C-alpha cells in the first residue's frame, strides 16, 4: 500500500479482478489512494493504526481485534470499513487453521479467500479492501484484513424493531417478500456448495426491505465459510438451525415453515421438504436449550 510500492505493483490474477499484489499485501486498486491518504501505507501501518471504534465483545480472544473505522477520501467524504487483526494465534487455532486451510493461509486469509470465492459465485458479500499476513514456516505471526461495511443493518437488529407476527395487508406482503428473498439467497449460498457455519441473524444484513425491488441481503463474518466435501446436508442443517434459532423469538413457526418450503424450492431438493423442517427445528431447539443452560437454566 506504500506509495513507493506503486511502480512495483502487479495485478494478482489469482485473487480476483481489480486486486493488486504488493509484496505481502493485497489491496483493491480502487482503494489504494484512500488507504494511503489515511495513513495505511503498508503491512506495519495496518497494525499501528489505532483510529476508529474498537469492537470488543464477551468471549473475543485477546489475540483477535476488530475495529470499525471511518476513512475520509480526498474530498472529505466518509467511507466505513472493518479492520480485523490477528496477532500470534494460540497453538489450537494454528492447528485448526492449518488443517482447514493449509500452511500458507492465515486467519485473515481464510476470510479474504472466502469473500473472493463467494463473490465469484455471485453471493452478496462485503467488498474486500486489503489483506496481509506474516507467516514463518507455516506458523502465523500476524495477519489483517480490511472489509467494506455492508449496507443496511443486521437481521438481528431489524427483526425486533420491524417484524410483526400479526401483520396483514401490505405489511404482510412485504414480510412474505422478505422471507422469499432470504430463502432464495440462503439457497444460492448452499447451492454454490458453500456453508457459512455461523449463519445467525447477526451475520445477515438487509437493506432496501421496503423498496419496490424487494429486500437485498449480504452475508458477513465469513472466516469460517468452506465447501464441505462430505456430510454436506449435515452442514446445511447446521446453518439453517442457527438461522432458525436466532430468528425464532420474532418469526412465527408458520413463517419459518413457509421459509423452509421456499428454500427447498430454490435449492431444487423437493425430497428435503419431508424431513428438513423437523431436523432444523430439532437442532434449533438444542441450541436454545444450550443457551438456557449457559444462562443458568433461565427459560
Image: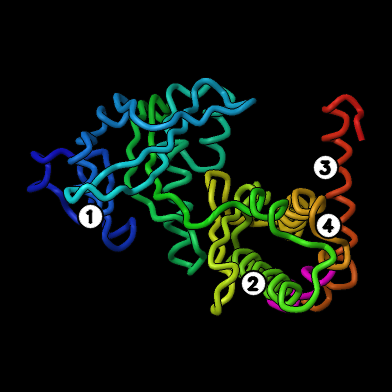
Q: Residue at x 90, y 72 (%)?
A: 274
Q: Which residues are magenta?
A: 257-267
Q: Position of residue 40 (x, y in %)?
A: 24, 36
Secondary structure found at label 4? helix
Which is more N-terminal, label 2 or label 1?
1
Secondary structure found at label 1? helix
The label nearer to you, 2 versus 3, is 2
Q: What residue does disc 2 label?
A: 181
Q: What residue does disc 1 label?
A: 29
Q: Residue at x 39, y 50 (%)?
A: 148
Q: What residue does disc 3 label?
A: 287
- Rounded to the nearest angstrom, the CA distance separating label 1 from label 4 is 42 Å
- Rounded to the nearest angstrom, the CA distance separating label 2 from label 3 is 25 Å
Q: Position of residue 183 (x, y in %)?
A: 69, 69
Q: Nearer the viewer, residue 272 or 162?
A: 162
* Horizontal side of residue 190 vs 222, given as left or right: right
Whether residue 92 appears in this view of the structure is yes
Amino acid at each position: 500500500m506504500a506509495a513507493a510500492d506503486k511502480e512495483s505493483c502487479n495485478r494478482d490474477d489469482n485473487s480476483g479482478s481489480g486486486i493488486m499484489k504488493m509484496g505481502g499485501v493485497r489491496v483493491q486498486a480502487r482503494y489504494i489512494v484512500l488507504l494511503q491518504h489515511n495513513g495505511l501505507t503498508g503491512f506495519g501501518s495496518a497494525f499501528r493504526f489505532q483510529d476508529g471504534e474498537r469492537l470488543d465483545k464477551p468471549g473475543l480472544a485477546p489475540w483477535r481485534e476488530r475495529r470499525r473505522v471511518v476513512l475520509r477520501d480526498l474530498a472529505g467524504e466518509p467511507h466505513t470499513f472493518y479492520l480485523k487483526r490477528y496477532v500470534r494465534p494460540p497453538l489450537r487455532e494454528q492447528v485448526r487453521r492449518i488443517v482447514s486451510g493449509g500452511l500458507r493461509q492465515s486467519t485473515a486469509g481464510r476470510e479474504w479467500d472466502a469473500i473472493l470465492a463467494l463473490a465469484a459465485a455471485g453471493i452478496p458479500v462485503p467488498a474486500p479492501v486489503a489483506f496481509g499476513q506474516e507467516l514463518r514456516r507455516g506458523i502465523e505471526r500476524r495477519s489483517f484484513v480490511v472489509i467494506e461495511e455492508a449496507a443496511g443493518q443486521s437481521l438481528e437488529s431489524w427483526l425486533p424493531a420491524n417484524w410483526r407476527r400479526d401483520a396483514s395487508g401490505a405489511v404482510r406482503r412485504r414480510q412474505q417478500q422478505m422471507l422469499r428473498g432470504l430463502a432464495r439467497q440462503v439457497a444460492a449460498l448452499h447451492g454454490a456448495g458453500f456453508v457459512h457455519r455461523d449463519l445467525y441473524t447477526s451475520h445477515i444484513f438487509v437493506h432496501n426491505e421496503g423498496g419496490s425491488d424487494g429486500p437485498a441481503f449480504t452475508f458477513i463474518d465469513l472466516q469460517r465459510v468452506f465447501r464441505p466435501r462430505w456430510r454436506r446436508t449435515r452442514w446445511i442443517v447446521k446453518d439453517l438451525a442457527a438461522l432458525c434459532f436466532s430468528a425464532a423469538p420474532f418469526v412465527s413457526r408458520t413463517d419459518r415453515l413457509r421459509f423452509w418450503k421456499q428454500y427447498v424450492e430454490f435449492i431444487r431438493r423437493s425430497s428435503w421438504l419431508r424431513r428438513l423442517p423437523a431436523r432444523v427445528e430439532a437442532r434449533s431447539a438444542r441450541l436454545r436449550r444450550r443457551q438456557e443452560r449457559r444462562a443458568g437454566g433461565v427459560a
